[in-house]
Image (tube, rainbow, N blue to C red):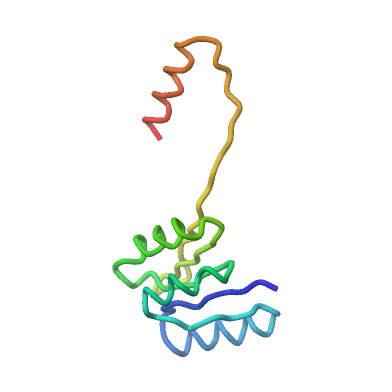
Amino acid sequence: MTKVLLGTVRSPVWRQAFQDYLENRGIEIAGPVSDPCELLKLSRDVKVVILSLDAPKTPSACSQLLDNYPDLTIIALAAEGNWGFLFRRAMTVQKVELDSLESLLQLIHSAEQE
């Protein structure tokens, strides 16, 4: 069963609506939690954190959560409207040909541009 942590989500009415909807679909809910330290602590036991984008420190909080829990998925909802951001830590692996020092230099330059 997927476990979701509800952080600071819009309003108590929205938070309850999310909770009721997800629980009725077999999703286990942790929280709600608004304290950043508690959010960090409780995030270790969940797969998904849902929080609101209206907090000014949302991006840094997401970075800190992903630093501590790289497999976590964070859904940050806009305070108004029907949009948000999905935060995940992603790792890519790509096979490269290194047939010369020049090809190594090209890889270094391409990394600088990303």
Q: Is residue 52 left or right of residue 17?
A: left
Q: How many marks?
A: 0
- In the image, 79 versus 106, the foreground residue is 106
Q: Name the residue rendered at 37%, 30% in the picture.
A: 112
Q: In this view, does 32 lie above or below 51?
A: below
Query: Which picture quadrant has residue 105?
Result: top left
Give the image quarter of residue 54.
bottom left
104 lies above or below 91: above
Residue drawn where x is 46% and y is 23% of the image: 107
Above-or-below relation of 70 to 45: above
x and y percent of residue 31 in the render? 50, 82
Out of 40 and 32, give the one closest to the viewer.
40
> Among all residues in the image, which is located at the extreme left?
56
The residue at the point 61 percent across, 27 percent down is 95
- In the image, 22 versus 39, the foreground residue is 39
For the C terminus, the image quarter is: top left
Q: Position of residue 70 (x, y in %)?
A: 52, 55
- Quadrant including the N terminus: bottom right
Task: Specify whether 92 is left or right of 25.
Answer: left
| Residue 109 image offset from top left, x and y in percent | 39, 24
